Image (cartoon, rainbow, N blue to C red):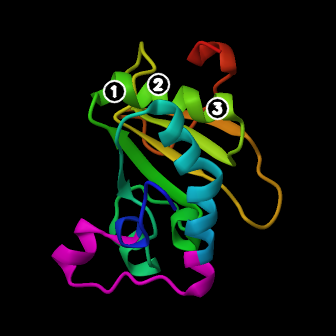
């Protein structure tokens, strides 16, 4: 874990505000370490600039407190992170492209893009230590509820 820490991946503003303990168990920590090794550190190396984690591990209670969060969220297993850059949506898009180019991921979601663009407010990325990684690329258009259409590589300029 060269560019990320466990404490960064379990930090939660929601947990702090609601006074909920958001600690990960050993299995969940192992999954976070694997996510960093497989996806986050390699993309940070290629990007060459800071990448921030807005949400990594979420305990069940934190996950349930968030609107539109899936009851089966990979965040609860330590298999997912929501990330963003200092360069805003354009930097986030570039990081999403890099993850897809590197090819080692379960799911990449370009989150809260506009109706007519692919500029995400953040990137959701997951990777499974156990089982097959799907290599899914999706988007979420702001204001469309829980709709996540599949995106092809051409739509993200690859």
Residue holding disc 1:
89
Residue 30, position as x, y percentages in the image:
62, 75
* Residue 48 on the magenta segment: no
The C terminus - image quarter: top right
Residue depicted at 59% across the width and 63% down the height: 79
User: Could you say whether the residue bearing mark 2 is in a helix, strand or loop?
Assistant: helix
Residue 83, position as x, y percentages in the image:
41, 46
Using the image, determine if residue 145 lies above or below residue 67: above
Residue 146, position as x, y percentages in the image:
49, 45
Residue holding disc 3:
100
User: Could you say whether the residue bearing mark 3 is in a helix, strand or loop?
Assistant: helix
Of pointers 3 and 2, the one earlier in the residue sequence: 2
Q: Is residue 142 left or right of residue 60?
A: left
Q: Which residues are magenta?
A: 10-29
Front residue (pair 45, 92): 45
Using the image, determine if residue 13 lies above or below residue 44: below
User: Could you say whether the residue bearing mark 1 is in a helix, strand or loop?
Assistant: helix
Label 1 to label 3: alpha-carbon separation: 17 Å
Residue holding disc 2:
94
Local packing at callout 2 (Cα closer than 10 Å; few below 14, some 14-19, many 20+) is: some
Q: Quadrant of residue 32?
A: bottom right
Label 3 to label 2: alpha-carbon separation: 10 Å
Front residue (pair 121, 147): 121
Residue depicted at 41% across the width and 84% down the height: 23
């Amino acid at each position: 874990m060269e560019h990320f820490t466990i404490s960064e991946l379990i930090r939660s503003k929601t947990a702090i505000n609601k006074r909920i303990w958001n600690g990960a168990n050993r299995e969940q920590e192992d999954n976070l370490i694997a996510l960093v090794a497989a996806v986050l550190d390699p993309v940070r190396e290629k990007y060459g600039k800071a990448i921030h984690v807005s949400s990594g591990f979420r305990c069940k209670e934190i996950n349930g407190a968030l609107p539109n969060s899936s009851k089966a969220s990979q965040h609860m297993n330590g298999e997912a992170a929501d990330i963003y850059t200092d360069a805003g949506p354009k930097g986030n898009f570039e990081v999403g492209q890099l993850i897809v180019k590197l090819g080692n991921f379960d799911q990449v979601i370009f989150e809260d893009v506009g109706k007519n663009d692919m500029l995400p407010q953040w990137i959701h990325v997951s990777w499974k230590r156990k089982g097959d990684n799907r290599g899914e690329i999706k988007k979420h258009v702001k204001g469309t509820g829980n709709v996540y259409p599949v995106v092809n590589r051409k739509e993200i300029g690859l």
